Amino acid sequence: MNFKIALLPGDGIGPEIVEQAVKVLNVIAEKYDHKFEYSEALVGAVAIDRTGNPFPDETYEICRTSDAVLFGAIGDPKYDNDPKAKVRPEQGLLAMRKRLGLFANIRPVKSYEALIHMSPLKSDLIKDVDFVVIRELTGGIYFGEPRGRTEDGNTAFDSCVYTRHEVERIVELGFKYARERNGNLTVVDKANVLATSRLWREVAQEISGRNSDVKMELMFVDNAAMQLIQFPKRFDVIVTENMFGDILTDEASVITGSLGLLPSASIGLQTSVFEPIHGSWPEAAGKNIANPLGTVLSAAMLLEYNGFSNEASAIEDAVARSLTEGVVTPDIDAKSKFGTSDVGDWLAGNIQ
Ligand code: IPM
Ligand code: MN
């Protein structure tokens, strides 16, 4: 079947990792008789350089009219070190989330046998870890108004805002995921301090009351941060607000031993976006050393979400084989002779 994929490589290592995912998608198309039609678009620092806007209207149009978006990474040190910059690459990511209505970010965290030795945690703690974090993505302190500075510049403020509707739709999604998995949902908040968290808790309890098939627990975020590294196996599905989810998913990513491996899906009102959870790693750009697996697995998620389950499994199996056979980039094995493109080629060949 004909399927339209928007490619947004972005900055730093983005282009080279997206290229590997496309290699893999191309052999999938051949093998399963699909036609994937790609349209490339600008986002991030490259988009600022060429158009002045980190998420140009043209990019939005391409995303909106595609069946799915595969995204690389954004970010450039020339903006990180300049807090006064008026336009920033990250604004492109936030604008994309808002304009496409991507209110849920799904980050699966799963340990791979071949990588267990790389985790900073003891191996018996992380063997068989398998949970999903659902992060709310278009609300909270990331977008709340008012925000800014007072006139004299000496006071700054951000607002954390959630509506009942925003909380309901994301918590409902948490219940749906838990129901399809092992039936356990952890709702993470800071209801002992924040008004928004008390709304989350109230809504979660209401939804729990009509969904007795799922066992819900409520947990404060500081406790969750601790339990994630102490007992990662106890989690099945976690649902939380935007900023808590940002922080907890970075924490969760090291459990598995490699940030380079984790994919994510951002879903919502329009086209869904699939992207690795790592950043643009500018120091590695163009050196053929970046790990393409997070992006390749994001392509697998893209297929899974769009009903191509066998195709997605074929990619996941090939990735698992590449890890067992040691066809990995230097971040996983410092002595490895395989670069970004070698891993992409190997995966494509292996799937074929
Ligand atoms: C992420 C990133 C972004 C976020 C940044 C780049 C704005 O850290 O996707 O987790 O904070 O959401
Ligand atoms: Mn983050």
Image: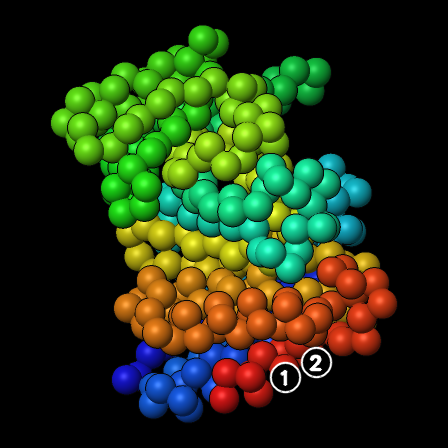
Looking at mark 1, is its residue's CB closer than 8 Å to ligand 1? Answer: no
Q: Secondary structure at mark 2?
A: helix
Q: Is residue 122 above or below residue 155?
A: below
Relative placement, left or right, of 161 versus 52 is left
Image coordinates for residue 188, horizontal then vertical, percent: 43, 25
Farthest top residue in view: 192
Image location of residue 74, percent across then percent down: 63, 56
Residue appearing at x 67%, y 73% in the figure: 325
Q: Is residue 268 above or below residue 237?
A: below
Q: Is mark 2 within 8 Å of ligand 1?
A: no
Is residue 186 visible to us here?
yes
From this view, report whether residue 31 is shown above or below residue 231.
below
Three-letter amino acid code of the residue under disc 2: Asp
Q: Secondary structure at mark 1?
A: helix
Q: Amino acid at mark 1?
A: Asp
Residue 271 appears left or right of 283: left
Pick the residue in front: 102 or 230. 230
- Seen as rendered, the residue at the extreme right is 335
Circle 1 residue = 345
Q: Residues within 10 Å of mark 2 (few under 14, many from 20)?
A: some
Q: Residue 155: horizontal and vertical position, in percent?
A: 65, 15
In this view, the residue farthest toward the left is: 210
Q: CA distance from mark 2 to mark 1?
A: 5 Å
Label placed on residue 342: 2
Please name the residue shown 38% across and 44% down the image. Answer: 104
Residue 152 at x, y percent in the picture: 68, 16
Q: Is residue 320 above or below residue 151?
A: below
- Which quadrant of the view contains residue 250? top right
Tag 2 near tag 1, CB within 8 Å:
yes
Residue at 45% over, 35% down: 235
The way the protein has been coloured in the rendering is rainbow
